[in-house]
Image: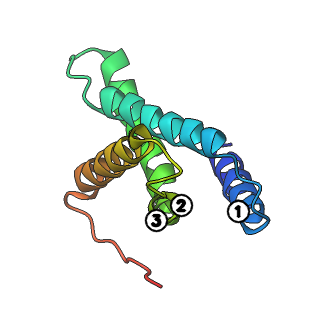
């Protein structure tokens, strides 16, 4: 479900951006939503109780992270910084973009400990 939703969202943003139909407010709201998702997954991963529910939360967080990092969120982050224009956008947009970028990289660092990744560039 996450895969298809993410794929459709990225395709719509790319299409709308090429056609200059992306609303700044909509994109800003989507950026905040992605940030909140990362915070929830981080919270799930940090459950420290010895009970079965905490263990399930940690396992589910790991599954969600594997789906999140399988997709090209870096393109969305780059798009966000390319989209920012100081005279057009408010300061909060840039702050939220930097905060999302920081949370994304911190989550990726946490997820990638002890793993080997291949990174596609270009």
Which disc number belongs to residue 78?
A: 3
Secondary structure beneath dot 2 equals helix
Q: In which quadrant of the rendered image does the N terminus lie? A: top right
Residue corresponding to mark 2: 83
Around disc 2, counting alpha carbons within 10 Å, would you say few (fewer than 14), some (14 to 19), or many (20 or more)?
Answer: some
The residue nearer to you, when weighing 9 against 57, is 9
Circles 3 and 1 in contact, beta carbons < 8 Å: no
Circles 1 and 2 in contact, beta carbons < 8 Å: yes
What residue is at 74 percent from the left and 69 percent from the top? 18
Query: Which mark is first along the chain, 2 or 1?
Result: 1
Secondary structure beneath dot 1 equals helix
> Distance between the Cα atoms at labels 3 and 1?
13 Å
Expressed as whole percent of the image width and height from the top left, the position of residue 99 reads 32, 43
Picture quadrant where residue 61 is located: top left
Extreme residue toward the bottom, this view: 122
Which of labels 2 and 3 is toward the front?
Answer: 2
What residue is at 49 percent from the left and 36 percent from the top? 32
Is 11 placed above or below 44 here?
A: below
Residue corresponding to mark 1: 17
Expressed as whole percent of the image width and height from the top left, the position of residue 38 reads 40, 38
> Distance between the Cα atoms at labels 1 and 2?
9 Å
Q: Is residue 60 visible?
A: no
Around disc 3, counting alpha carbons within 10 Å, would you say few (fewer than 14), some (14 to 19), or many (20 or more)?
Answer: few
Which disc number belongs to residue 54?
A: none
> Distance between the Cα atoms at labels 2 and 3?
8 Å
Extreme residue toward the front, this view: 87
What residue is at 39 percent from the left and 48 percent from the top? 94
Secondary structure beneath dot 3 equals helix
What residue is at 51 percent from the left and 42 percent from the top? 31
The residue nearer to you, when weighing 55 against 69, is 69
């Amino acid at each position: 479900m996450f895969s298809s939703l993410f794929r459709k969202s990225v395709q719509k943003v790319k299409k709308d951006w090429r056609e200059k139909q992306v609303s700044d407010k909509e994109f800003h709201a989507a950026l905040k939503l992605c940030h909140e998702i990362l915070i929830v997954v981080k919270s799930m991963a940090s459950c420290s109780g010895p009970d079965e529910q905490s263990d399930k939360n940690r396992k589910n967080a790991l599954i969600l992270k594997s789906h999140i990092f399988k997709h090209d969120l870096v393109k969305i982050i780059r798009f966000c910084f390319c989209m920012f224009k100081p005279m057009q956008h408010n300061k909060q947009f840039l702050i939220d973009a930097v905060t999302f970028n920081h949370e994304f990289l911190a989550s990726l660092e946490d997820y990638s400990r002890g793993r080997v990744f291949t990174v596609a560039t270009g």
